[in-house]
Amino acid sequence: MDIKNIDANILNISERILALKSAELPKEIRQLDTHSSPQSEQVLQNWREELIDLFAYSFTNLDTKNKFDVENWGEETLNLLIKIDFSLDNAIKVIRYYRIIVGEIIKNEAEKIELSLSDYHDLIFKFTSIIDFAIHWLSITYTRFYTNRINAAETSVLELSIPVIKILDGIGILPLIGDIDTKRAQELMDQALLKGGSLSLEYLLIDLSGVPIIDTMVADRIIKVFDSLKLIGIKPILTGIRPEVAQTMVQLGIDFGSVMTYSNFQDALINIRKF
């Protein structure tokens, strides 16, 4: 029996799938909604119904149309599920639940109409293809969303970890705490120039008392920051170099001879006021 000649049977299968909208959900699926608010329950109900629609019409659409529908559904689903904090793991559990139920519907209907093995295989293949693509696309959209969120949070943390604080008229301080990697070193450059200029600083004290290690890369970055600050008219001052850090710098041959340095922030401030 040719698939093209069983449109009525395909329609019957689609209608049986659509009937799942009114079917009672098993306890394990209902419990996936850990939120008791009516709003979250309605969001999940709408999402499950859209999922059923996607499966029901997957037999009547071309593969390209199916993928387009899944992509749109994936984006819309993401926005809804993220708002109610519904996890990707739970979303996939719901999809797998319907996969089993719809698979049984297809099998039972195929037996009733004595569908050939070849035609049955074509139906199952089309359905499982849309299921696999749905899970794949949902995973991609979730991953993209959380990757963007993590990157945004990382950027915020970087900015907060390099604060330029104006303490007196024309004088600012930039205290550094912790290790300085490549990203943080670049943020140091950006923030020093951006905030130094916007705060109309004449002096910027970069305090390293909270930095445990200075290597050649970090030292090179700091020197470049100093050179850049000088170009925009800000006098950079280095403070708080710990003894063990100073010893490491000497051993590595790092030269801060052209940089104004003080043992601590207070000494630097006292000397600035003498100028």
Image (cartoon, grey):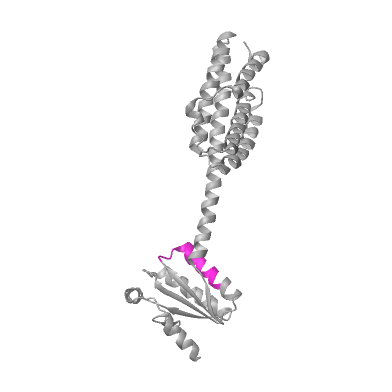
Position of residue 127 relative to residue 220, above or below, is above
Secondary structure mostly seen in the magenta stretch: helix
Q: Which of 128 and 146 is in front in this view?
A: 146
Position of residue 51 relative to residue 121, above or below, is below
Q: Position of residue 120 (x, y in %)?
A: 56, 15
Q: Position of residue 81 (x, y in %)?
A: 57, 40
Position of the N terminus, as image quadrant, is top right
The residue depicted at 64 percent of the width and 15 percent of the height is: 12
The residue depicted at 58 percent of the width and 15 percent of the height is: 119
Q: Where is residue 142 in the image (x, y as percent from the top left)?
A: 54, 42
The residue depicted at 44 percent of the width and 84 percent of the height is: 268
Residue 45 in magenta? no
Left or right: residue 190 compared with residue 255: right
Residue at the far front: name it: 37
Residue 183 in magenta? yes
Q: Give the range drawn in magenta.
A: 178-193
Position of residue 114 relative to residue 168, above or below, is above
